[in-house]
Image: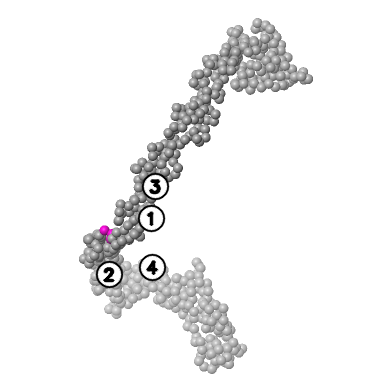
Amino acid sequence: MTQRFPRLLTLALLLSALTACGGDDVIPPPDTDGGSTDAGARDGAADGGGARVDGGGTDVDAGACTDEDGDGRGALPCGDDCDDADATRFPGNAETCDDDDEDCNDSTYGPDGDSDGFPSVTCCNGADNCGADCNDVLNTVNPGAAEQCNGGVDDDCDGLADAADGVCVPCPTGYAGFDGGCVDLNECAVSGFCGTGGTACVNSAGTFSCSCGPGFFAAAPTGAQCEDFDECAAATGPCGALGSCTNTVGSYSCGCPPGYVAGAGGCVNVNECTTNPCGPTSTMCTDTPGSYTCTCVTGYAAGGPGGGGTCADVDECAIGTCGAGSSACSNFVGTFSCTCRAGYRSSGPGAPCLDVDECAAGMCGPGVASCTNTAGSYACTCAPGYTVASSGAPCVDTNECATGAPCGAGLGTCANRPGSYACTCNPGYGAPATGGTCSELNECVLGTDDCTDAPAGICTNTAGSFTCACAPGFPFGTRTARGALGCLVRFTDLGDGTVRDNRSGLVWQQGFSPGEQAQAASVTYCTSLTLGGGWRLPTKDELLSIVDSSRSNPSIDTAFFPGTPSTWFWSSSPVAGSPSVGWYVYFSSGNANVYDATSMYRARCVR
């Protein structure tokens, strides 16, 4: 018994790792009794429909049983198929982990492969309806079994085994608890335990050792199985730098690029030149790593980009050797001949058509600014005064006088010159000595006007002439068509709080009323003014005469009327037909308007 135990214990350990979701343990009755009477519920129409089945007092014709779903089981009541519309449901069918009763036993709980009355944990019908048998192969393992000291088998499916479940003492690695003690595990009793590469297995107390074949290794002298040695993962690959290494079980294989073969230490170059692959029209074959190159006589070339191939005649016409400037090409053995288009030339047989550099030959002529050589032609960029008819044509002088009016319509006469022209301009106009249009002369800028010197006189240029006027503040003087004489200043500060308007001759109060009042009170304010006497409230037009429209806020010359507010000033002018309304001038913008005469405005007096 002691000698047999390790093998039985090892088998139990291996089987304990297996689980299965098998079918129910129901064995279906035979489909027919083979006789002339219906002995079984599934006899169906086996006896021709003439036999009768005792159904508890009522005869049932077994031949009348249907099998609509074609599963080989007749429908109730004469058959035993619980659902004759579903071919996956009949007695004896394997129960699966779903909500259907596949075996017609009124239970959808799941399979019980070892027939121990406990469904497998791998079968669940919803979160709350799962089996509890942790090993559905061994009927000695289930939640109702007692834990045994049997080498690590969880007999009662509580997640604990042997010593962990309190039925035997803990055992070291390589031993298993059994019958209250620890026994050696004979790993070698299992066939092929050392793996595919193992050649021999030797058991020893608490461990084992494996002998490994070529291409395999054991990680440790004892207690380790044989593993495949990945030769391709070695620091120095067995296929060398050029080869691609593919690991296989116990070995490897090398893939080499073209021109190489697998050999000792990796991929080895093949010397193709030993067989003269270049052919008789070559002068030399040179071996290169992975290939070879051919040196061919003139007119021949070796095929294959980057090397390889045999020297053969080159059809220069087929590869366009004559170039874009060719109109025809003739191929000969080892040479060719080109017929060239205009703008191209060939140096002879075996030479392509080359572009002619017209720029170097001075084809653009003397009026060129720049020349650009193009394939088969040239392009001229002409200097001013020269034009070109088209690409490939030289520059020619442009007769500007014949094209329009280069000097200006009616402004002068034109004379053509090589590359340019000259204009004789009318009085008041001028042009450059060569080329250019007659343009109006600005006498005011040139200083050829006779206007009074600034700041009194202002010169304004006109087409072919100029005019003179007095500057702002100097509006008076005797004017002529081409001059302004005696321009005088607009206002004069009399130094006593009064200002004289040199245009109208009126004398104005330099200041204004200290407060605001109605129109009638403003009249009184002016007649009572004691600044030399004779003051009155001005009319609307008089008040507007001192408005400076070039100014705003206030619109008056503040150099002579300092401190003037941008507000309303009364005039003495009434509104016709409306004695209660008067005219005023708004010195923010300089506009005049009417309003109720009782409104409170300022006043400035005049005499």
Which of the numbered marks, if any, corresponds to residue 250? 2
Q: Residues within 10 Å of mark 2 (few under 14, many from 20)?
A: some
Magenta span includes 246:
no
Residue 283: name its quadrant. Answer: bottom left
Q: CA distance from mark 3 to mark 2?
A: 73 Å
Label 4 amino acid? Leu
Report helix, strand or loop for mark 2.
loop
Label 3 amino acid? Ser
Q: Tags 3 and 1 in contact by the CB under 8 Å rule?
A: no
Q: Which residue is mark 4?
A: 160
> As drawn, is 400 to the left or to the right of 219?
right
> Residue at 78% of width from left, 20% of height from top?
577
Q: Which residue is mark 1?
A: 327
Tell me the quarter of the image containing the N terminus. bottom left
Q: Residues within 10 Å of mark 4 (few under 14, many from 20)?
A: some
Q: Is residue 223 visible?
A: no
